[in-house]
Image (cartoon, rainbow, N blue to C red):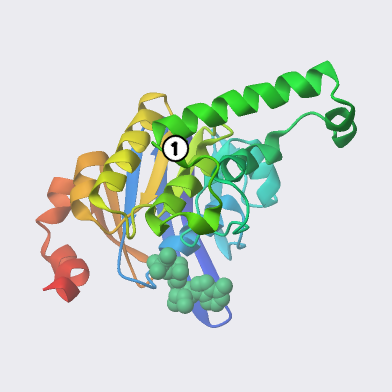
Amino acid sequence: MTIQANNVTVRFGGVVAVRDVSLSVEKGQIVSIVGPNGSGKSTMFNAITGMVSTASGTVSVDGKRIDREPAHRRIGLGLARSFQTPRFDPHTTVFDAVMCGFYPVKKSSIFGAMVRTPFAAAEEQRFRDRCEAILEDLQLSEFRDLQMNELPMGRVRLVEVGRAVANEPKYILLDEPAAGLARDEQRMLAGEVRRLAERGVGVLLVEHNFNLIRELAEHVVVLKEGAVLLEGTPDVIAKDRAFIDTYLGRAG
Ligand code: ADP
Ligand code: MG
């Protein structure tokens, strides 16, 4: 059970944003993509989830080719993602923001929801219970009735993760979920990512904080200018000269 990307290339006009990239994420595995800004990390996410088209290469999930499937069908196959820049209605509550994550998988009709058929009511209750559990996991329960514009950015990112995990995906792609998080928020995020993997979810994580990567990921893929520069375990990567020069170079 795997997400498998083979030789994926994505072009924007003359720009090759992703060049011949292959990677795989198994169920229960945490794989991290790292690389400087503009190295193609988000574009690779977009290629897997169907938000950009690939110029060549293939993407499959559990052996089924998905690279010509529309994004909504890929969600149906168990893929979820968070966005690098979360976009929520500022006036929606934290609880409702996480509830949004269920809409793609909602089985009951609008009619059913309006007249509250037993099926629609049971489904709604199941989603509400699951939503409460997610808020608890991410220590967001105390904020549940706040509006999104009342939350600090770190918590907004956690809500974004909560929304993505809501519909119990098989694979989840998290795009820089820890950016700007305070240390305690990072702990909550790391805990949630670990719990997901323990439950058998495959996690693809774009992350800059190498301590967090070392703590969570078993495999790291380093991108540079859209191509794979090197890959391996966090410990092996951390010692690599090419990695140190490209990735840590700007930090000194
Ligand atoms: P990263 O997430 O690693 O910072 P991106 O995947 O966002 O990098 O971007 C990779 C390259 O593709 C960059 O040169 C960026 O400018 C370009 N790019 C990304 N998205 C688009 C787009 N929608 N249209 C044109 N160019 C894009
Ligand atoms: Mg990005």
Q: Is residue 193 above or below residue 10?
A: above
| Residue 218 in sight here | no
| Residue 63 in sight here | yes
- Residue at 80 percent across and 19 percent down: it is 119
Q: Secondary structure at mark 1?
A: helix
Across and down, in percent, residue 52 comes to: 60, 63
Report the front residue among 77 and 172.
172
- Identify which amino acid the numbered label 1 is placed on: Glu
How many residues crowd mark 1 within 10 Å: few (<14), some (14–19), many (20+)?
few
Report the front residue among 36 and 2.
36
Q: Is residue 46 above or below residue 184?
A: below
94 lies left or right of 190: right
Q: Quadrant of residue 238?
A: bottom left
Q: How many marks?
A: 1
Mark 1, ligand 2, within 8 Å: the answer is: no
Across and down, in percent, residue 201 comes to: 44, 31
Across and down, in percent, residue 65 comes to: 61, 43
Report the front residue among 200 and 20.
200
- Residue at 63 percent across and 36 percent down: it is 77
The quarter in which the C terminus is drawn is bottom left
Across and down, in percent, residue 100 comes to: 64, 43
Q: Which residue is mark 1?
A: 142
5 lies left or right of 237: right
Q: Is residue 171 above or below residue 20?
A: above
Q: Quadrant of residue 56?
A: bottom right
128 lies left or right of 224: right
- Residue at 36 percent across and 29 percent down: it is 195
141 lies left or right of 212: right
Q: Is residue 83 above or below residue 25?
A: below
- Residue at 47 percent across and 42 percent down: it is 143
